[in-house]
Image (cartoon, rainbow, N blue to C red):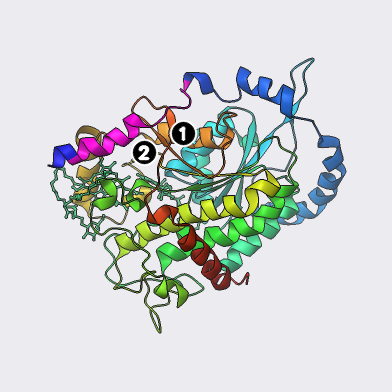
Amino acid sequence: MATSLLSSSLCIHKEGKSNVSLKETSFLGTSLSNHLKSEFTPTIPKNKAQCNQRKISASIVSGQTMSTTPTITHATTPGKKTLRTGSVIITGASSGLGLASAKALAETGKWHVIMACRDFLKAERAAKSAGIAKENYTIMHLDLSSLESVKQFVDNFRRSGRPLDALVCNAAVYQPTAKEPTFTADGFELSVGTNHLGHFLLSRLLLDDLKQSDYPSKRLIIVGSITGNTNTLAGNVPPKAGLGDLRGFSGGLNGLNSSAMIDGGKFDGAKAYKDSKVCNMLTMQEFHRRFHEDTGITFASLYPGCIATTGLFREHIPLFRILFPPFQKYITKGFVSEEESGKRLAQVVSDPSLTKSGVYWSWNKDSASFENQLSQEASDVEKARKMWEISERLVGLA
Ligand code: LMG
Ligand code: NDP
Ligand code: PMR
């Protein structure tokens, strides 16, 4: 039974329509220049004065929060229109998928990466040991488990004078062994508070900055996961994701006068994480419905594959950490290296052929991307709307 379930879940990947192969989508290669010819009108000079002006105030804070001075560089091809360096914020870029995608994007030479991290020193060491060139990244402090920190990050970013062309909501915590809930600075259960509510406020605030960007393809990417989707085998491993009627969420997830769980049930750290991923995927779609048409911004989510070696499993029992990578490699075959997952996320950020909005991307075994199907709950329009409205209230936007 296990085998048949396994292969049926893998079939979803095989059967998925493969839109692009890696070969076809080499970052910003010929296909991008073609794309640019038709779509891109350079508007750098318009922003430059504004940028310079902002740079002055940015220098006041840069000593503390930034490792490089903001500069806007241009990639020039003689005789062709030029595309300025893109500016992308990646949350949780100090390890795992975030670091790998920061490296992949920086290495194209077409992106400056703002690594939005809670631990400045760790991020600096990580960037150095990954070999990311100094001029290609800036580290800025962001602790997603504090709404005040999110607001400060947005202020600091604006002061830096950089445009915002892409935002990647990647950071996450996972507490599979926690017996009792812990809470964010604002009193929300930590996993949903950090993975969803912190990112919700961040992306709502930065939407204005994305709107102002003159980049040809502006994107807001939120990392989702297979384990939040109950239409897959992985999503059926207990405890399963389920938001119920959102009664705990509506009550503020504070564990005092309301449950710490979205569905109002008993605390379960693994479920809270999976629920937070459902919120991430619902948020992406609600953004798409509310803002895509008017702004042209691409909103997308993805399941990058099972990156069984990352820090995400740091709180799991040691035996799990030993067995999980070989289990995923040899049994489920869902394993993907950090490097490969980084390339996948980088593709969703910058590949000219992945501009479709409202999509949940996955990759098949040949590492070709395809548009995957979300579970019924993760694509529930009414639930997305309700979840959005409660989130607005909890983060103080409504
Ligand atoms: C929970 O336990 C913990 O309680 C929780 O605290 C948290 O840690 C959480 O997700 C994290 O895990 C999960 C536990 C329960 O799973 C295990 O880790 C136990 C392992 C049991 C080993 C079973 C043998 C499998 C083969 C072994 C290979 C050896 C390698 C070791 C691997 C270690 C790492 C995993 O899990 C269970 O209850 C086990 C049963 C899981 C099967 C679930 C399948 C349900 C299928 C339902 C049908 C759905 C159909 C979907 C079809 C979709 C198609 C469209
Ligand atoms: P890691 O633990 O390696 O990376 C998570 C990052 O989030 C770290 O940089 C961590 O910072 C950061 N972070 C955690 N809490 C906060 C906070 N309060 N404020 C700011 N940053 C924070 O895990 P992964 O790379 O595996 O996870 C990245 C994303 O990929 C997550 O969204 C996860 O849900 C998703 N994902 C992962 C899969 C996997 O198999 N690993 C599968 C599917 C999705 P620090 O370095 O300081 O701890
Ligand atoms: Mg899962 C095709 C099968 C498949 C895939 C792709 C994953 C991904 N897992 C699969 C199957 C199974 N897992 C099976 C059959 C089991 C029971 C033995 C199993 C168990 C399991 C555990 C205990 N798996 C896990 C855990 C975790 O603690 C991880 C988790 O749920 O984190 C929330 C996890 C994961 N399995 C995955 C992926 C991608 C994860 C982790 C990360 C995530 O969703 O972010």
Q: Name the residue under label 2.
A: 305
Nearer the observer, 41 or 287: 287
Q: Residues within 10 Å of mark 2 (few under 14, many from 20)?
A: many
Apparent side of residue 306 relative to residue 157 in the rendered image (left or right): left
If the image is split into quadrants, where does the N terminus sit?
A: top left
Badge 2 marks a residue whose secondary structure is loop
Relative image position of residue 272 (x, y in whole percent): 35, 63
**In the rendered view, would you say 331 is above or below 194?**
above
Q: Which residue is drawn at 22% across and 51% down?
A: 318
**In the rendered view, would you say 186 is above or below 223?**
below
Look at the numbered discs 1 and 2 and tell me whether their residues touch, using CB distance below 8 Å: yes
Relative image position of residue 112 (x, y in whole percent): 64, 37
In which image quadrant can residue 264 be found? Answer: bottom left
The answer to whether the beta carbon of the residue marked 2 is less than 8 Å from any atom of ligand 2 is: yes
Q: Which residue is drawn at 40% across and 80% down?
A: 258
Relative image position of residue 139 (x, y in whole percent): 60, 48
Name the dominant secondary structure of the magenta segment: helix
Whether residue 166 is visible to the viewer of this picture, yes or no, is yes
Apparent side of residue 162 relative to residue 26 in the rendered image (left or right): right
Q: What stretch is highlighted in magenta?
A: 5-22
Q: Name the residue under label 1.
A: 344
Residue 12 part of the magenta segment? yes
Relative image position of residue 159 (x, y in whole percent): 75, 54
Badge 1 marks a residue whose secondary structure is helix
Nearer the observer, 151 or 203: 203
- Marks 1 and 2 sit apart, C-alpha to C-alpha, by 9 Å
Q: Three-letter amino acid code at disc 1?
A: Arg
In which image quadrant can residue 243 be found? Answer: bottom left
**In the rendered view, would you say 127 is above or below 211?**
above
